Image (tube, rainbow, N blue to C red):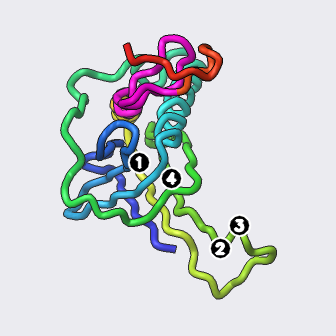
Amino acid sequence: MPVFDYDPPERFVAGAVGQPGSRAFFLQARGQGRMTTVGLEKFQVAVLADRLDELLDEVLRRSGGTAPVPAMAPVELSDKAPLDLPIDEDFRVGTMALAWDPDTSQVVIEAKEVDDEEEEAETIDDDRPDSAVLRVHITAAEARAFTQRALEIVAAGRPPCPLCGQPLDADGHICVRLNGHRGDRT
């Protein structure tokens, strides 16, 4: 199983490429003269950001406020730069895992390659190659900054309909609140 391990990365961000409604989403880690870019879905970026915040809040709660976890993202760690080029997808993400390492006071994020064959196979085939994994170790402050950027990336898509909350496209959309009639963009 190829493991792309960054402990710590120089940069770890979520990003998107393309126009709202047809964007491609990525996680990108850079460090030690190499870069790994993995593709994932918009909802995976949103879930990762939410779960990171929940993990950090829980660490802070369990420590009674003594853990080195900031309540908010430090301004100096804000990263507004675009993804690094070239954007060459190393693999597509299937599952993700989060952990808190109390020895290093770091968050460990793992993104595992989607394995279509695994879903179809009823038994484990030892001849199949293992899935790739992106593993990143970051501080709690860096995790808060990652979360802030990830949520901004997700929110930068198509604006929601003020009536039903579904995303609007350039031509409006079929609004369920208007009995199936096409709603106007506002």
Q: Earlier in the sequence, mark 2 or mark 4?
A: 4
Q: Name the mark nearer the viewer: 1 or 4.
A: 4
Dominant SS type (magenta): loop
Q: Earlier in the sequence, mark 1 or mark 2?
A: 2
Is 13 situated above or below 65?
A: below
| Kind of residue at disc 2 | Glu
Specify the label residue 119 is tagged with. 3
Q: Name the mark nearer the viewer: 4 or 3.
A: 3
Question: What residue does disc 1 label?
Answer: 137
Q: Residue at x 25, y 30 (%)?
A: 77
- Distance between mark 2 and mark 4 Cα atoms: 20 Å
Q: Let me know if residue 70 is in the magenta part.
A: no
Q: Which residues are magenta?
A: 150-173
For mark 2, give the secondary structure. helix
Q: Earlier in the sequence, mark 4 or mark 3?
A: 4
Q: Earlier in the sequence, mark 1 or mark 4?
A: 4
Viewport quadrant of the C terminus: top left
Q: Name the mark nearer the viewer: 1 or 2.
A: 2
Is 180 situated above or below 100?
A: above
| Kind of residue at disc 1 | His
| Kind of residue at disc 3 | Glu
Can the viewer see residue 147? no
Is 61 situated above or below 136?
A: above
Could you tell whether 177 is left or right of 69 in the image? right
Graded by Cα atoms within 10 Å as few (under 14), some (14 to 19) or many (20 or more), the crowding at tag 2 reads: few
